[in-house]
Amino acid sequence: MNKLGLFGFVIIFSSILFAQSYHGSSIAGLFDLPSFLIVFGGTLGAILVQTSSKQLLHALKLLPEIFTSPKLSLRQQAEKIQKWSLKSRQHGLLSLEKENEQEASLDAFTNKGLSMLIDGCEPEDLMEILRR
C-alpha cells in the first residue's frame, strides 16, 4: 500500500473536519446534500469539460495505483538503469534490446524510453517525449 497516498487522504479529511469544528459548526454540517451536489457535481462537470473520454478512462484505471506501492523501489530502478548504462557502454545500445524484451517488471514509461533509446532516438527528443 502506498503510505503517502493514504497519508494524503488522512490530511485532507482531518483538515476539513478541523476547519469545520474551528469555525464553530458541527461536523454534521458537512453532510448537506445541496452542498455535496454543488461541490462534487461542479468538480465532476469541470473534469468532464476539460478532459477527453480517453484521458478520463485512463485516469480512472490508474486511480487504484494511489493506494499501491510501485513494483520496484527507486533504489531497484536506479540499480537497473546503472546496469543498463554499463552494459550499453561495453556492448552498445543494441545489447539492451534483449533486456527490454525480458523485463516483465518494466512499467510502460520505462519500457517506451528504453525502446526509443535502443532505436537510436536523439537524447533531446527522447527527453522531450518522456517529459510529456
Image (cartoon, rainbow, N blue to C red):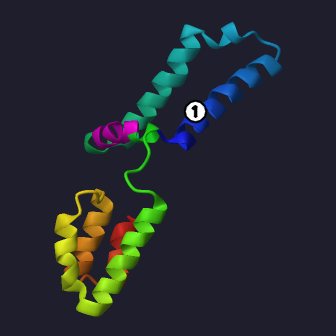
In the rendered image, residue 62 lying in the magenta stretch gets the answer: yes
Position above or below: 21 against 1: above
Residue bearing the label numbered 1: 9
- Residue 52 appears in view: no
x%, y% of residue 54? 25, 43
Q: Residue at x 30, y 43 (%)?
A: 58
| Vertical relation: 108 (above or below) 23 | below
Q: Quadrant of residue 16?
A: top right
Does the rendering let one see residue 27? Answer: yes
Residue kind at label 1, given as amino acid type:
Phe
User: In the image, 40: left or right of 99?
Assistant: right
| Image spot of residue 115 (x, y percent) | 22, 72
**What residue is drawn where x is 82% and y is 21%?**
22
Q: Residue at x 42, y 63 (%)?
A: 76
| Span shown in magenta | 56-64
x then y, percent, for residue 30: 64, 14
